[in-house]
Image: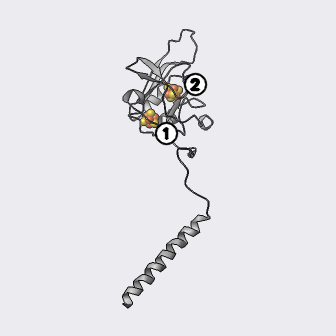
Amino acid sequence: MVTYFKEIATAAINTFKGLGVTLRYLFKPAVTVQYPAEKLVPFERFRGALLFDAETCIACNLCVKACPSSCIALENATNEAKKKIAKVAWYSIDFGKCNFCRLCEEACPTKPKAVWHSLDYELVFENRDEMVRLWKKNFDFVGMFFDRKSKEYKKPAGQIPIQTVAARR
Ligand code: SF4
Ligand code: SF4
């Protein structure tokens, strides 16, 4: 009988202890965010989706050599105007192979960087085509992908807006 009441008392004490913890946190500010309605901005050094600027790139190939995953490819544009600084005809990164190591960004000699990690962490791919991001002159920093079914360039869907251009070094 004594054990029975002891157990009831212990259970009651533990319940009040639990409620005490709940009560303590009830008046503290929330640390969780209501994702996806609310989104946190990562730290400046965060390595999100790579962005590329075809206007800044001098087609030096340093990022291609630095990449340990061999996921960058580019082709030099024909320098018809005989300008000293070369430009790219196209530039591509295969996100299916990329390990987000930042070596390409570090190797890039331009100021600001022609290739750089954004703060975008919501990369979603529905097929292999979407993983191969392509840039040409007049494409924006996010780039396009080539859809082999419809045989046309398409904008990648599901990537958050570029909140990152300011973070470009
Ligand atoms: S982040 Fe690393 S793996 Fe990805 S493209 Fe750059 S160098 Fe290659
Ligand atoms: S992105 Fe930078 S490192 Fe790569 S080819 Fe262009 S200028 Fe050179």
Ligand 1 within 8 Å of disc 1? The answer is no
Q: Earlier in the sequence, mark 1 or mark 2?
A: 2
Whether the residue carrying mark 2 lies under 8 Å from ligand 2 is answered with: yes
Residues tagged 1 and 2 counted as in contact (Cβ below 8 A):
no
Look at label 1 and name its amino acid: Glu
Amino acid at pointer 2: Thr
Q: Residue 157 in the image: x percent, y percent? A: 48, 30
Which residue is located at x 38 percent, y 30 percent? 127
Task: Identify residue for label 2.
Answer: 56
Going 62% across and 64% down the picture, which residue do you hit? 27
Q: Tag 1's secondary structure?
A: loop
For the residue carrying disc 2, how many other residues have a C-alpha within 10 Å: few (<14), some (14-19), or many (20+)?
Answer: some
Q: CA distance from mark 1 to mark 2?
A: 25 Å
SS for callout 2:
loop
Of the pair 13 and 61, the residue shown nearer to us: 13
The residue sitting at 56% across, 44% down in the picture is: 37
Foreground mark, 1 or 2, reads 1
**Which of 115 and 15 lies nearest the eye of the viewer?**
15
* Residue at far top of view: 80
Residue 20's spot in the image, x, y percent? 55, 73
The residue where tag 1 is placed is: 122
Mark 1 crowdedness (10 Å alpha carbons): few <14, some 14-19, many ≥20 = few
Q: Position of residue 95 (x, y in %)?
A: 42, 33
Front residue of 45/29: it is 29
27 to 14, vertically: above or below = above
Q: In x, y percent, where is residue 110?
A: 57, 29
